[in-house]
Amino acid sequence: MGISLPIKNNAEIDSIKDLYRRKNQISELLMFTLAINTGIDLIDLLNLKVKDIKNKLYLSLDKNKTIPLNDEILELIKMVIAKRKSNEYLFSNTNGDKLHRASVFYSFKNICAELGLSDKYSAASWRKTFAYHYYMKYKDLSYLQWLFNQTNIKLALKFIDVDENMNLRYREGVCL
């Protein structure tokens, strides 16, 4: 599969979302949107059931990781689960079985190809996309290390495809 990079360009993210909407692939749109806005691992996404997310403002992956859901995600959730039973998988195939990871990768590769986007994007890019944009906004590597179980800052920066010399991040103006 090769290396997958974060989707750094917001216009590319918007074009992916728009294509999902045009194709009426709302479930896939929800999966993509959830992943790029929360950093949830694909395996965790595929294991979600309707009851895990129905009528909730937060998603609890375990007792230590509770993630807020934004308005766009909440609206997509309502659309996806409208006629679904609580014990069904949130992301399922036509037989009601849990989607397989490989089918998600294949489907997303097709979306990217249709849009003429880089072949360096895959479903593995989703978490990296969240991490990249989170880092660019907050410069908080410690949270990303914790969320992704990274052992050091260099790994976290490599994960999000950021080449930053931390020596240059000295904060001037510290006068104690």
Image (spheres, grey):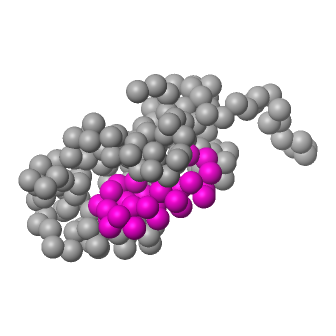
Image coords of residue 135 (percent x, y): 62, 45
Name the image quarter holding the C terminus: top right
Residue 81 located left or right of residue 25: left
In the rendered image, residue 17 lying in the magenta stretch gets the answer: yes
The residue lying at 30 percent from left, 48 percent from top is: 45
Image coords of residue 152 (percent x, y): 57, 25
Image coords of residue 145 (percent x, y): 53, 35
Q: Is residue 26 above or below residue 31?
A: below
In the rendered image, residue 172 lying in the magenta stretch gets the answer: no
Total numbered badges shown on the rendered structure: 0
What secondary structure is the stretch in magenta mostly built from? helix
The residue lying at 66 percent from left, 53 percent from top is: 137
The residue lying at 53 percent from left, 46 percent from top is: 117
Residue 60 located left or right of residue 70: left
Residue 116 appearing in the image? yes
Q: In this view of the protein, which residue sits in the foreground, 41 or 68?
A: 41
Name the image quarter holding the N terminus: top left
Q: Is residue 152 above or below residue 13?
A: above
Q: Which residues are magenta?
A: 7-36
Q: In this view of the protein, which residue sits in the foreground, 69 or 103?
A: 103
Q: In this view of the protein, which residue sits in the foreground, 51 or 158?
A: 158
Image coords of residue 55 (percent x, y): 27, 72
The residue lying at 89 percent from left, 42 percent from top is: 172
Residue 44 appearing in the image? no
Q: Quadrant of residue 88?
A: bottom left
